[in-house]
Amino acid sequence: MIEAPRYYVPHSSPWPIIGSTALAITAFGAVSFIHQSTEKVAAEGSFGEPIFFIGLAMIAFMMFGWFGIVIRESVKGMNSVMMDRSYRMGMAWFIVSEIMFFAAFFGALFYARIMSVPWLAGAGNNLETHVLLWPEFADTWPLFMTPGGGITEAMEAWGLPFINTVILVTSSVTVTFAHWALKKNHRVLLPIWLAITVALGTTFLTLQVIEYQEAYGELGLTMGSGIYGSTFFMLTGFHGFHVAMGTIILFVMLLRSLRGHFSAENHFAFEAASWYWHFVDVVWLFLFTFVYWF
Amino acid sequence: MAVTADHNIPNRSPLMAFLSRWLLTTNHKEIGTLYMWLSFVLFFIGGAMAMVIRMELFQPGIQFAEPLLYNQMVTLHGLIMVFGVVMPGFVGLANWQLPMMIGAPDMALPRLNNFSFWILPFAFTLLISTLFMEGGAPNFGWTFYAPLSTTYGPPSTDVFIFGVHLMGISSVLGAINIIVTIFNLRVKGMTLMKMPLFVWTWLITAFLLVMVMPVLAGAVTMVLTDRHFGTSFFAAAGGGDPLLFQHVFWFFGHPEVYILILPGFGIASQIIPTFARKKLFGYHSMVYATASIAILSFVVWGHHMFTTGMPLTAELFVMYATMLIAVPTGVKVFNWVATMWRGSITFETPMLFALGFVILFTIGGFSGLMLALVPADFQYHDTFFVVAHFHYVLYPGAIFGIMSAVYYWLPKWTGNMYDERLGKIHFWTAIIGVNMTFFPMHFLGLAGMPRRIVDYSLQFADFNMVASFGAGMLGLTQVLFLYIVIKTIRGGKKATGRVWEGAEGLEWTLASPAPLHTFETPPKFPTPEEDYPRD
């Protein structure tokens, strides 16, 4: 019988404790920062903002160091086939948890559209609520006028959002081209396709910023303009944050590929990045369909 | 536990060596120990809060806890017990046991394991520090319903929100690690349907964690933006709905209660066969029952919301789906009883706790069935009957599960046998205390005593006094438990590798105490004809 390969177990690492300290500092800083900037509670003299950013910087430092040793272990050939499978499974389940995070906000969106807005307009057995509280309120989606009287315009799906859809779907294709190039060990095409993908991600984010400016400046569509604005900014905002993360990750992959990392057989970091990118893309397709289009 | 880590760092002061060992460790046994101690410490903090609650309820009227303090105690007691005691307790057991039970050298992602643990002390420091903040700690109950947490929440609510985020990150990463370990690092020959049941139940629990902890993160995020960034998810004036909060929360919350009990099922399924000296009855049905319970848990959250004016159809669906869960649960109870049938049973402390678990958890299950009935729930809702119900499934359920596991595996961890006489005293005082505390609450609830209120009407006085006496007894006996654990760590009768005559599984093929690194080369998993090697 063939001896099973020894599973590599690192014996100690400073990075996790740096990471958990960083998370705690970030959380503490975020609370003080929010209290400071919303001025709802007395928070003079607290250093929320710098603490928050120090925490974020520490998280970045931790990722740099932690991923650094993982890369070095991989380069040294310490990773067995089993180890590789652990990383793959770990990444896959992480994406599952991310899907569920978005599911919570999609749940809120569907609940508002199917339940709460019609109910506020008197659907079901809620006629009294409607008549007694907000008789003027009409059931529309996008919700142009909230029961409380807040007014907004809707974001048009076939302008910037549609362009962004095309951009993101294209970037999913280009990242796959980069993967194919890597698998054929084509070291020129790999960084080119990766760079195009990063550029597309950056363009997406830029257009998103322009879209937000338009929403706030011209449409009166803000986080405060009722459940339409709430779900709109929560979903597109967290998605945008994920695109930003994905773009940074792909940019790191670009730098690594230029440094000669990855081989045609062994490049899980690249694959994980592309899985993440496809995940972000699919979330966007749902977003485009249910937030902008229908 | 005289185990020294093999870090090659010479000439360090004892303090630095201690810190570097526990802060930087990637060893599943050391991390398991850390989890268990965190759980134990928080058990006493959360328990002290329960004592405040019971002392206040000792007599009608307000003794010493102002309503605001009382509400803070109720909230933090719930949060600490759920997120700080039961979950880390089970994760600690998983860390210690899973690799040894499946013949793995460690958890699949050891550094991530350290990260998952060390987030928690920070998270609970944040949470407990809210007690000393202006406006006090969160006071809206562990369920933090909107608008109590949005419009009316104290400033410390934001600390609570980020604390929950940290706990969520810890749980999700820990769960991913457990899933990957179980799927990827099993010894050759151990197919899924040959895994010990503790491994199975943890696999399913970890799946639930990955599915629902992010939803909790979403819920607290929406509370945060509603509080500070003008969104109106839970505000009707903006087109949202406070009820939406309950839907999102209980979509997390109901699977969460199975997260709190499924590993306990696994523990009972390990311990009962050992002391009945028979193989577990109905292994396959146990696995399928656990999976069915987990799947059903995703479609029954509405039973927490029967009195919110849900549509009748939804109430009926949720009612029937909830009662359906009684079927797989009944299968499990039946199997535990059938395992003992005609076994040659001995009643060591782990077995006593496991039996207490089976019997008292079943009582909690039955009161759960009563609560699942829509018309009956209209009467029971928000009364002490609910408090009685969930304490019966959590204290003699989850906590007894952890305790029986600690007695069962402590000899393996420390190499010493615990004091059997003290263990039995602990068990009997605990089981009398548990029943004295929580059984009268059924009557209180049926008679209409509302939960989460600092004061009550005179007619509830007698049962409350009984419950408070019971709680005192239950609390004190846990100090004995702490003493027993420390005593066992420090010495005692040496344990054999096998420890228990009827014990089966890879972890018992190791020496006691288990060396720091085990199964660095995979062990041999016996075929059905073979027995596990005996020492």
Image: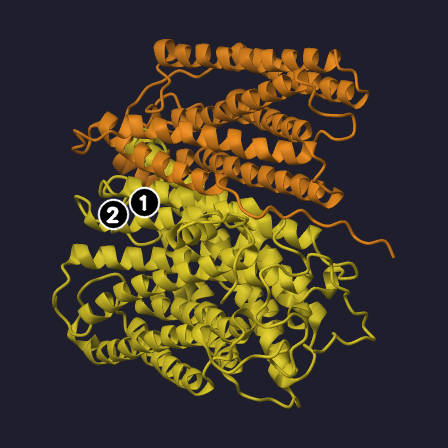
Which residue shows up at 49% across the image and 11% down it? A206
Given residues B362 and A184, the one toward you in this image is A184
Q: Amino acid at mark 2?
A: Thr
Which residue is labeled 1 in the image? B160
Which residue shows up at 54% across the image and 37% down it? A98
Given residues A126 and B162, the one toward you in this image is B162
Is B240 displayed left or right of A16 in the figure? left
For mark 1, name the chain.
Answer: B
Which residue is labeled 2 in the image? B130
Query: Nearer the N terminus, badge 1 or badge 2?
Result: 2
Which residue shows up at 23% across the image and 56% down it? B71
Q: Position of residue B270 (x, y in %)?
A: 61, 73
Identify the image quadrant of residue B436: bottom left
Asked if B348 appears above or below B110 in the picture, the reply is: below
Q: Amino acid at mark 1?
A: Phe
The chain coloured yellow in the image: B
Q: Position of residue B348 (x, y in %)?
A: 52, 85
Pointers 1 and 2 in contact (CB under 8 A)?
A: yes
Helix, strand or loop at mark 1? helix
Asked if A21 appears above or below A276 in the picture, the reply is: below
Please indicate, yes or no, whether residue B320 appears anywhere in the rendered image. Answer: no
The chain coloured orange in the image: A
Q: How many marks?
A: 2
